[in-house]
Image: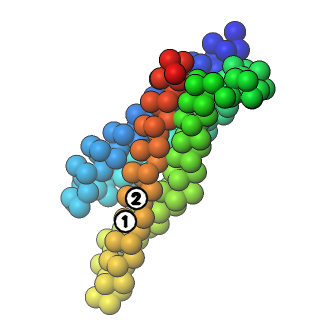
């Protein structure tokens, strides 16, 4: 019964986490970037608590994955971990952990700062302050974009490894 519950949480959490990241990175953000709708869209996502739920899905996916691997490998035993499935699950799990770290410690903080700076820009600051904010916003956009694409790419690697590991 434990395995069924863990797999359900792991798979549904992974779908929400990685799928949401793919949707945001490849469709949502490019569609609204630089448009007047961007602040309203981000505010709407914040009201719906997307930025709270996404890391929760990520941590649930990672933790259930670790437990499932523990069970499959009988405590991370070398005889299992050196097999094709063991190595593939390990690679996928490592990719997921790095994706989570990027998301929580790089992308999310940059996004929060971007939101605060966008609010300052909306207040129509003086020209010199506007220039300084513009430079800072661009720097944060690049950092956020790189971290987001890195996390999404690693999430895709993790999902592919999970899908293929049993056949390796």
**Looking at the image, which residue is at 67% across and 15% down?**
3
Q: Position of residue 155 (x, y in %)?
A: 47, 39
Q: Position of residue 72 (x, y in %)?
A: 69, 19
Alpha carbon separation for disc pair 1 and 2: 6 Å
Based on the displayed image, in which of its 4 quarters is residue 58 positioned?
A: top right
**Looking at the image, which residue is at 58% across and 23% down?**
85
Asked which colour scheme the image uses, the reply is rainbow
Q: Secondary structure at mark 2?
A: helix
Please determine whether, in this image, residue 53 is positioned above or below residue 149: above
Q: Nearer the viewer, residue 10 or 168?
A: 168
Q: Position of residue 113 (x, y in %)?
A: 47, 66
Residue beneath disc 1 = 142
**Looking at the image, which residue is at 55% across and 40% down?**
96
Q: Residues within 10 Å of mark 2 (few under 14, many from 20)?
A: some
Please determine whether, in this image, residue 145 is positioned above or below residue 60: below
Q: Is residue 125 visible?
A: no
Image position of 43 (left or right of 31): right
Based on the displayed image, in which of its 4 quarters is residue 62 positioned?
A: top right
Q: Residues within 10 Å of mark 1 (few under 14, many from 20)?
A: few
Q: Secondary structure at mark 1?
A: helix
Outermost residue toward the top? 1
Q: Position of residue 111 (x, y in %)?
A: 44, 59
Q: Nearer the viewer, residue 164 or 102?
A: 164
Residue beneath disc 2 = 146
Q: Do labels 1 and 2 touch, CB within 8 Å?
A: yes
Q: Is residue 4 visible?
A: yes
């Amino acid at each position: 019964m434990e395995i069924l519950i863990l797999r359900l949480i792991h798979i549904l959490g992974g779908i929400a986490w990685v799928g949401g990241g793919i949707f945001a990175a490849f469709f949502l953000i490019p569609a609204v970037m630089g448009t007047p709708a961007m602040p309203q869209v981000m505010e709407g996502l914040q009201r719906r608590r997307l930025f709270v739920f996404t890391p929760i899905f990520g941590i649930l996916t990672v933790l259930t994955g670790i437990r499932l691997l523990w069970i499959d490998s009988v405590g991370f035993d070398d005889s299992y971990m050196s097999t094709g499935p063991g190595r593939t699950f390990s690679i996928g799990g490592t990719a997921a952990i790095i994706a989570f770290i990027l998301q929580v410690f790089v992308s999310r903080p940059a996004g929060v700062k971007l939101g605060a700076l966008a609010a300052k820009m909306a207040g129509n600051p003086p020209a010199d302050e506007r220039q300084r904010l513009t430079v800072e916003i661009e720097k944060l956009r690049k950092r956020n974009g790189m971290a987001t694409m890195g996390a999404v790419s690693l999430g895709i690697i993790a999902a592919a490894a999970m899908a293929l590991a049993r056949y390796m």
